[in-house]
Structures are given as C-alpha cells and as structure tokens.
Amino acid sequence: MMTTSRILIQWALWFAAFWMIHLPKSGAFSLGAPFQKTLATFKDAVHQVNTNRKEITVEVAQIPEDLPGIRACRSTVDFAQQTTGNLLASQKSFLNATALTDPKLNAICVIARNAQGSIVGTTDCRVGKSEVVVNNVLVRPDQRGQGIGEKMMVGVEELIMPSASTTKLTLNVYTDNKPAVRLYEKCGFAISDPANAAVFGLSKLTGANLQVAMSKTIKR
C-alpha cells in the first residue's frame, strides 16, 4: 500500500512537470484552470495530512463504554497463531482486554482517537504503590508513523502519574522490537539495572530476542 508521504511526493513531481510544460514561452506566470485545480488538490491533500496528525487525541478509556473500540483496535494485531486459532491465553486476554474488566488488577487504559472518534491506539497501565507498569502498547497498523505511540506515552505521564503514589514507570520490551525500544528511549526510558543491561548486551552479541526491563522516574 502506498503511504501518504509517497503520494504527496508523486503529486509534487507531477505538479512541477505540469508547470514546466505549460509555462508560457514569454516567461510570464499565468495559471490556467487545470493548473489552478491541480494546485488546489495538492494543497487539500497536504492540509488533510496535517489535520489528521493534529486531531489525534489521547484520553483515559471509560470502561465498559470504550471496550468495543479497544477490542476492535486490538483485533488488527497480526498474531501468527490467529490463522490456526491456537492463540495463547495471554494473547486472548490482550485481544479481549480482560485486564481492564478485572478490578483486582487495578488496570487503566490510555487510548488514542482519530478525528472520526475511532480508537487507533491503546496502552495499559497497572498502578501499584511502588511503580506504574506500562504494557500492551499498540498502535493500529494503518495509523503508524504519526507519533501516536509517543502521544500515548506522554498521556500516561500526564493523565495517570499525577494521581499515582509513585514516580516510577516501568515496562518490558523484547530486544527484537527495535521500533518499540527506540520509542521508549525517545520518551526517556532506560535499561533499569545492571542485570538488564547485561541481558541487552547479550542480545546484541548473540542476536537472541530477549526481554529487558526499562524504567523512568517522573519529575514532579
């Protein structure tokens, strides 16, 4: 599928070619009707991309009202086992957002909505006395590349942490998930201790896909 950026680049190239072909030989700049229509279409496309990026909103999910939207968003995840129907218990729990309906787990979900109000990203948080654990960070595949993951991580800090009894955020990530590792590092997370640093180093050395813990302390 062609990305929006590639479409805009092609529009720009076509726009430049059209200008060169139809520019009057006298050198005077005159916009004909087809040229004006092309220019307007290009501006509309750029405006639509910018509008979509700006209109992503982040909020705390309301349960049970937002459960259908959360489940619909998570159903876009491509688990290899989905084709065979042999999902792991943890995968089924994630898809069904089971943790959000269990009051014992004290789980909260931060969601991202697009301009149409559809949920396009979810992030679960388990609020404890000594730390807030972030997990299940997901952005719908067709909505990636807009900074939604980063916006949700900021949302966790701004919407969840002020009322928490701790300033520590923690999460686990697999070393092969390089986009996630880059996102968390960009958001200020770091390998939490020497043991996890050793695991991370071993992963780099051997190429093994290992799970490491990352953490961040929020300033108040």
Image (cartoon, rainbow, N blue to C red):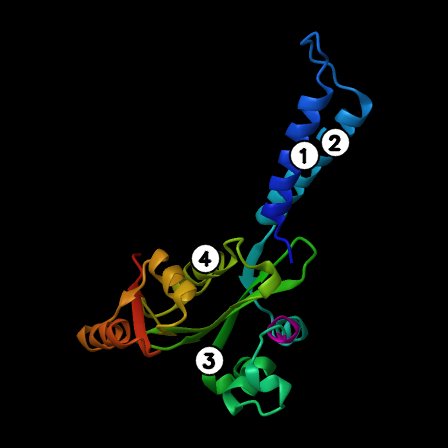
User: Which residue is depicted at the point 38% across and 69% down?
Assistant: 164
User: Which residue is depicted at the point 67% across and 75% down?
Assistant: 68
User: Which residue is depicted at the point 33% across and 74% down?
Assistant: 131
Tag 3 and tag 4, C-beta contact below 8 Å:
no
Reading the chain from its start, which is encountered first: label 1 or label 4? 1
**Which residue is situated farthest in the left direction here?**
194
Tag 3 and tag 2, C-beta contact below 8 Å:
no
168 lies left or right of 6: left
Reading the chain from its start, which is encountered first: label 3 or label 4? 3
Reading the chain from its start, which is encountered first: label 2 or label 1? 1
Q: Amino acid at mark 2?
A: Thr
Instruction: Mark yes or no: residue 22 visible.
Output: yes
Residue occupied by mark 3 = 106
Range shown magenta: 71-75
Residue occupied by mark 4 = 150
Within 10 Å of the Cα at label 3, are there few (<14), some (14-19), or many (20+) other Cα atoms?
A: few
Residue occupied by mark 2 = 38
Instruction: Name which quarter of the figure residue 14 lies in.
Output: top right
- Judged by its main secondary structure, the magenta piece is helix
| Discs 2/1, front | 1
Cα–Cα span, label 3 and label 1: 54 Å
Tag 2 and tag 1, C-beta contact below 8 Å:
yes
**Which residue is situated farthest in the right direction here?**
33
| Discs 1/4, front | 1
In the image, 63 versus 142, the foreground residue is: 142
**Total tally of numbered discs in the picture:** 4
Cα–Cα span, label 3 and label 4: 23 Å
* Residue 16 versus residue 145 in the image, above or below: above
Tag 3 and tag 1, C-beta contact below 8 Å:
no
